[in-house]
Amino acid sequence: MADALEGNKSLAKLDPASTHRFQTPKKTINEGEDVNFFLTSKGYADIMTWLLQLNAAMFPKKTDSSYRTWSLGDGDVAFSDPVQKLRSLLQKLASVIDEAPPDPGPRRFGNVSFRKWFEIVEQRLPAWMDETLPANVLEFGKDDGGDGKAKDELVAYLLGSFGSAQRLDYGTGHELSFLAFLGGIWKLGGFAEADPGVEERGIVIGVIEPYLELIRRLILTYTLEPAGSHGVWGLDDHSFVPYIFGSAQLSPPIRSPADIPGEGSLPNAPDPGDVAKPNAVQRERKTNMYFGAIGFIYDVKKGPFWEHSPILYDISGVKAGWAKINKGMLKMYNAEVLSKFPVVQHFPFGYLFCWEKDPTAAEPPKTVHTQNQPLRTPPTAQASEGTQRLPPQVTKGFSANPQTGLPMTAAPWARPSGTTGTTGAGGLGRSRQGMTQIPAASASNDVTTAAPWARSAATSRSEGGQTAGMAPTQAPWARKDPAP
């Protein structure tokens, strides 16, 4: 993972002159041990390479005399013909919402009309794909006897990116499926040839951002539930990648992906603490993906930011700049999305993203996520109502989520114990006391997720929305200094 964060590789493209065994992607992750294999697979390596490739393209670029930045709605970002056609496809998908208005009846979880929207899309998508991508991509290469074509794999990943029609929810696993859809097109040579970073920027700003806008509209229209959400203990109820690409937008300029720094910010970049200031968020969300995601949180949640989004609030205290946040977000994505069984269990594998051992992959590190994956048949002594709990020798010395009994995710960049202070961010004036430091043993046991750039949330508050005695959220890469 450390080497991968250099971000100087590109996702390899398939040879059209070779034979290929395309197949309809199938669910393969059925138990915890499958996640450990996934982290050493070719599919995982391709996903991370693709994510890092897109991330590097969003860093400002140094020029001979100055630098160039990339903003949402930026006229200088070129959209190739393949990108334009994908944008048109997203517009068609959005138009289907008008054909499936939300059911007016009261209900607690999700709106059943989302199933009608999904059904219409499922029926029309094969024809729309024929209009969007050329035949040499959809019927790529020579057939080697697989049970499908490249088109079948792309359709499966795209359909999986809108949420679950069965559970009426949406989460980062569905977002991952959209990354795979775009990565599949790249592997098939479906995007334009251009200088490094040019087409990738067009994909992020021209396709991924409109996709996120579509998803936000689906969530609001059909009240889709968060899929696998940790509630306030998670980064975001629905999305993750806009925080990666948005922090890259605000990082220091680079000349090549090999130059990506570990700290610093773009000159005149907004302060990370501005996420707690609604006026600043409304201003920045028009041009930046990070603030765009924060803005959607403000659209759907009420109350103090630190209360409903404590992990993001912790990260807002990072003093080392947006590049530090970007690097921490990549590590957190690897730990909280790609290493979590509830998130990746529905990701299907075919030929484009295959379930094969990567001969160059190292064994994944022993963390709470890899060591405590659910079993196919969980022992009844360890589980109650589907909740698996860690044995005392594993959890000793660590704060536990009171709902699951599992250790809280630690982001190894959190504020140490004993720091106090008050914040003026957003006029909240909250007292920060009782910060809990991650035990020294956690470093050697590798129980916590390493994201060394956050500040742990307060364990107790005499005033505010947190229940007394609840364990603190720890984001081990955020605030280390008292908030101003």
Image (tube, grey):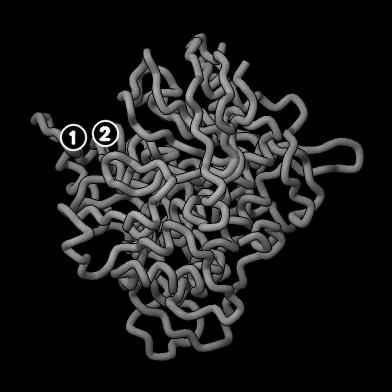
Residue at 66% in and 65% down: 10
* Three-letter code for the amino acid on which mark 1 is drawn: Pro
Front residue of this view, candidates 166 and 142:
166
Q: In this view, does 462 lie to the left or right of 72?
A: left
Q: Return the residue at label 1.
A: 102
Packing grade of label 2 (10 A; few <14, some 14-19, many >=20) is: some
Which quadrant of the rendered structure holds the N terminus?
A: bottom right
Q: Return the residue at label 2.
A: 221
Q: Is residue 288 above or below residue 27?
A: above
Pick out the residue farthest to the left. 105
Q: In this view, does 465 lie to the left or right of 138?
A: left
Q: Is mark 1 on a helix, strand or loop?
A: loop
* Three-letter code for the amino acid on which mark 2 is drawn: Thr
Residue 8, image quadrant: bottom right
Packing grade of label 1 (10 A; few <14, some 14-19, many >=20) is: some
Query: Disc 1 or 2, which lies upstream in sequence?
Result: 1
Mark 1 vs 2: CB contact within 8 A: yes
Q: Can residue 136 be seen in this view?
A: no
Which quadrant of the rendered structure holds the C terminus?
A: top right
Instruction: Give residue 477's position: percent from left, percent from top.
Output: 59, 40
Q: Is residue 197 visible?
A: yes
In the drawing, what numbered circle is on residue 318?
none
Front residue of this view, candidates 195 and 435:
435
Residue at 37% in and 13% down: 463
Residue at 64% in and 35% down: 71
Instruction: Give residue 386's position: percent from left, percent from top.
Output: 19, 55
